[in-house]
Amino acid sequence: MGEPRSSPDNDTLLDAYSRAVIHAVDVVAPAVGRIEAGRAHGSGFVFTPDGFVLTNSHVVSRASRIDVSLADGRSFGAELIGEDPHTDLAVLRIAVPAGGAPLAWATLGDSRAVRVGQIAIAIGNPYGFHHSVTSGIVSALGRSLRARSGRLMDDIIQSDAPLNPGNSGGPLVTTGGAVIGVNTAMIQGAQSLSFAIASNTARLVAATLIRDGRVRRSYLGVAGQNVVVPRAARAAGLAASSGILVQSTEPGSPGETAGLREGDIILGFAGEPVTGIDDLHRLLTEERIASPTPLVILRRGARRQLIVVPRAG
């Protein structure tokens, strides 16, 4: 018997898949650049016609000089407009000399419209191989991932499009050529576990960085650790099962001014439950700066409420 022949339907599907990937690459790859930032290198992409570039904070952090090389062979010195280590995002800007060809730029799509199972295409510069393309599918939505700053990043897209060192900061793209994520990490030693910051997060952070140069968040000045609430307190009708044990407060900080003490357990903030440090980080937004906010604590087995006024941190 001879080798089984592929069916016309399979051939048609393969051709359709290939055409879809090729279309996405044709649309987005001209906007993707290799980023050299001292000893670090990675990827990024132009996302506005006037030369703003998105990449990862960890690619450009602490670099004294940053250069961006595009697919058309042009290289530019880049200015760091701002970075946010807590979302691992940074915005650069490159300027085209007078008379130079316009920059290609990629469009940020709506990550809320992404569906598990749809095709995801990663474009970047792994190991220095310029403009490499990998593809797969969106494996999961709404993941959380720890940033290098220690803060938890939410709304992370998981895909099985293979990433390698150097892909960081490059775009994750739909077959239509819309950027749905900024590639940020893969798990070393694991196959098909790649992560990207959702485009809607990237859009908000980038706009703030362009406007202010940084992302402001509120701050209490409290050092603590996650703990299980004592059984006696739960038996007394306290609904919370865990919280943050206050280990210290910075002198003159909002936490100390509000009356927080070592040994208190934080259970709630701004009317929301706090089951651990990650919950509190999510709630300490820019909107809370200078705003008197209720803080629920457990002190010596009794529930109390303090009013804290967070500062910019």
Image (cartoon, rainbow, N blue to C red):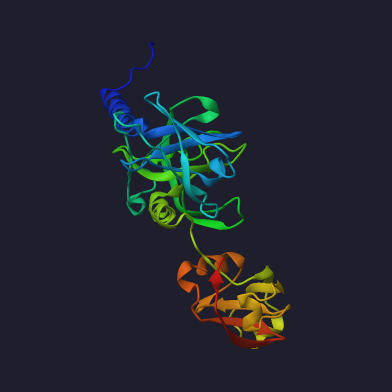
Q: Looking at the image, how many numbered discs can be counted on the residues?
A: 0
Measuring from the top left, give residue 257's x and y in whole percent.
63, 81
- One can see residue 159 in this view: no
Identify the image quadrant of the N terminus. top left
Q: Which residue lies furthest to the front in this view?
A: 98
> In the picture, residue 112 is in which quadrant?
bottom left
Q: Is residue 19 left or right of residue 203?
A: left
Q: Which residue lies furthest to the top in this view?
A: 2
- Which sits in the foreground, 190 or 33? 33
Q: Measuring 38% from the left and 52% from the top, which residue is drawn there? A: 203
> In the picture, residue 135 is in which quadrant?
top left
266 in relation to 216, above or below: below
Q: Measuring 57% from the left and 73% from the top, which residue is drawn there? A: 274
> In the picture, residue 173 is in which quadrant?
top left
- Which sits in the foreground, 162 or 4? 162
Q: Is residue 142 left or right of residue 296?
A: left
- Which sits in the foreground, 303 or 55? 55
Measuring from the top left, give residue 300's x and y in whole percent.
72, 86
Measuring from the top left, give residue 211's x and y in whole percent.
40, 56
- One can see residue 233 in this view: yes
257 in relation to 313, above or below: below
Identify the image quadrant of the C terminus. bottom right
